[in-house]
Image (cartoon, rainbow, N blue to C red):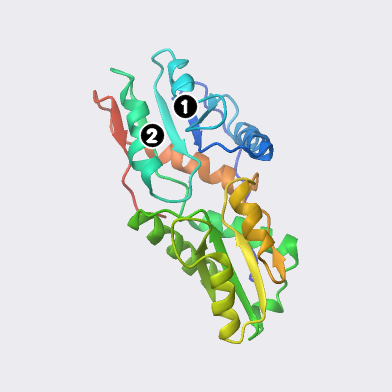
Amino acid sequence: MPRSRPTHAPRTTDENGPALVAVAHGSRDPRALVTVTALLDRVRELRPGLDVRLGHIELNEPLLSDTLAGLAHRPAVLVPLLLSRGHHVKHDIPQAAARLAGVDIRIARPLGPHPYLVEALLSRLAEAGWSAEDGTSRSAGVVLASAGSRDRESAEDTRRMAELLGERLGGVPVVAAYASALAPTVPAAIRALTARGRHRIAVASYFTAPGLFSTRSAAAAPWIAAEPLGTHPAVARLLLHRYDEARALPGTTRTVRRLELSAA
């Protein structure tokens, strides 16, 4: 496997900036909240003094609406803990932010696609048993398992992540697959790779935290299945990167600003 770039970030302080509100989807799996909480602790370690808060779209507390209400008119940057553009990013989060009239609320891009996520995926695959030899094997392949969305741009983002991962794996075929809404499913992607003579197939878990979809995807793996991205240092760095991107927008009197930048 190609060597991963360092994922360390300098410790800086940020006591006067807008709050960082990480927006998670929410899950009935108790591991999800534990994982997201630990990830935000890592973000706080990287940026001491930064006000880091959590809000969920559904299923878990605190809900995003409650977190925003607790800001007391303080400026904030909402960073989606989501991996692609989709309904939650385009509609649910802006609608929640728009309810705070007169408050400078900026909405960052979702986390993916981004090279930092490739770093995390590579690390998780290595932890599961992927080796440098697998990267040169004609029998190896990878299924990038994600939640799935009917939003066209969301699917584009996931396919782009599969391309980025494949490039870093030295040309090993990486097929984007989905746990819901879209084809191919993870089992179908595995069958397609098998038909191409790829019998050593790993499932890369393209989820921010454990949950129903990640568990189902891992169960379909014929060989190894990586853990979700979770608290990997590269994910924490990416959260701060998205926050800094949005914060750098020019000042405005408008309540909500959407950040539309390139994926990198």
How packed is label 1: few (under 14 Cα within 10 Å), some, or many (20 or more)?
Answer: many
Can you give x and y, in whole percent of width and height, for residue 53 in the image? 54, 26
Describe residue 88's horizontal placement relative to residue 124 as left or right.
Answer: left
- Do the residues under discs 2 and 1 have CB atoms within 8 angstroms? yes
| Quarter the N terminus occupies | bottom right
Can you give x and y, in whole percent of width and height, for residue 159 in the image? 44, 65
**Residue visible at 54% across and 67% down in the picture:** 165
Mark 2 to mark 1: distance in Å?
A: 8 Å
Q: Callout 2, which amino acid?
A: Ile
User: 149 or 169, which lies in front?
Assistant: 149
Q: Earlier in the sequence, mark 2 or mark 1?
A: 1
- On screen, 199 above or below 46? below
Q: Is residue 20 visible?
A: yes
SS at circle 2: helix
Describe residue 17's horizontal placement relative to residue 166 as left or right.
Answer: left
**Residue visible at 45% across and 60% down in the picture:** 158
User: 246 or 39, which lies in front?
Assistant: 39
SS at circle 1: helix
How many numbered tags mark residues here?
2
**Residue visible at 37% across and 27% down in the picture:** 96
